[in-house]
Image: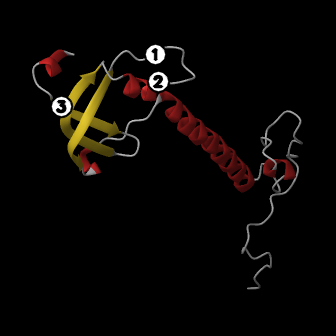
Amino acid sequence: MGNLAEHERAFIFLMDYPNRRRVKLWGRAEFVEDDPELLERLADREYGARPERAFVFHVEAWDVNCPQQITPRFSRGEVEVAVGEMERRNERLQRRVALRDALESGQVAERPHVARTGRDLFHPRSPRPSPRRAARPKRGASTRSVAS
């Protein structure tokens, strides 16, 4: 029971780091051991144990703080999910860049259908571009010769 044995004033500080919220509660606290009705109401019916004493907090004041100085914190699982999504997006973008570079350099004459389905352009079962194919003219480039 610590400090409450000498003084009943208490303070509860609640932090919600991911949502950057903080609540402060001021009040008076007491331990209750001789109230069977209260202890019965606090009992969890799905849990086999019975409470022997309760900590009761009487709120006298509360305050919600500005989130400006609260650094968001996340659980390991939340970070792993976010990083996994970013890694998958990065892989998709790398495939798009590789395909674009291959199209621009003439290694691939046209955009293969398999790239849109998510198969890597250079997957072993993907058709290889023929080195004998002529590069297609870029869009907007004139194919007519200019007479002098």
Q: Nearer the viewer, mark 3 or mark 1?
A: 1
Q: Position of residue 71 (x, y in %)?
A: 31, 41
Of mark 2 and mark 3, the one earlier in the sequence is 3
Identify the secondary structure beneath mark 2.
loop
Quarter residue 2 falls in: top left
Which residue is drawn at the image coordinates 30% and 19% (left, top)? 34
Query: Residue 8 vs residue 62: left or right?
Result: left
Q: Position of residue 65 (x, y in %)?
A: 24, 49
Which residue is drawn at the image coordinates 14% and 19% (left, top)? 3
Judge by depth and name the residue closer to the eye, 4 or 116.
Answer: 4
Number of dots carrying numbers = 3
Q: Position of residue 134 (x, y in %)?
A: 84, 57
Which residue is drawn at the image coordinates 81% and 55% (left, top)? 111
Query: How dense is the environment of label 3, judged by Cα within 10 Å: few (below 14), some, or many (20 and up)?
Result: some
Instruction: Give the amino acid at mark 2.
Output: Ala
Would you name the residue on which mark 1 appears? Answer: 50
Judge by depth and name the residue closer to the eye, 137 or 58.
Answer: 58
Query: Residue 1 vs residue 54: left or right?
Result: left
Judge by depth and name the residue closer to the eye, 28 or 83.
Answer: 28
Identify the secondary structure beneath mark 1.
loop
Would you name the residue on which mark 2 appears? Answer: 43
Which residue is drawn at the image coordinates 85% and 46% (left, top)? 131
124 w.r.t. 6: above or below: below
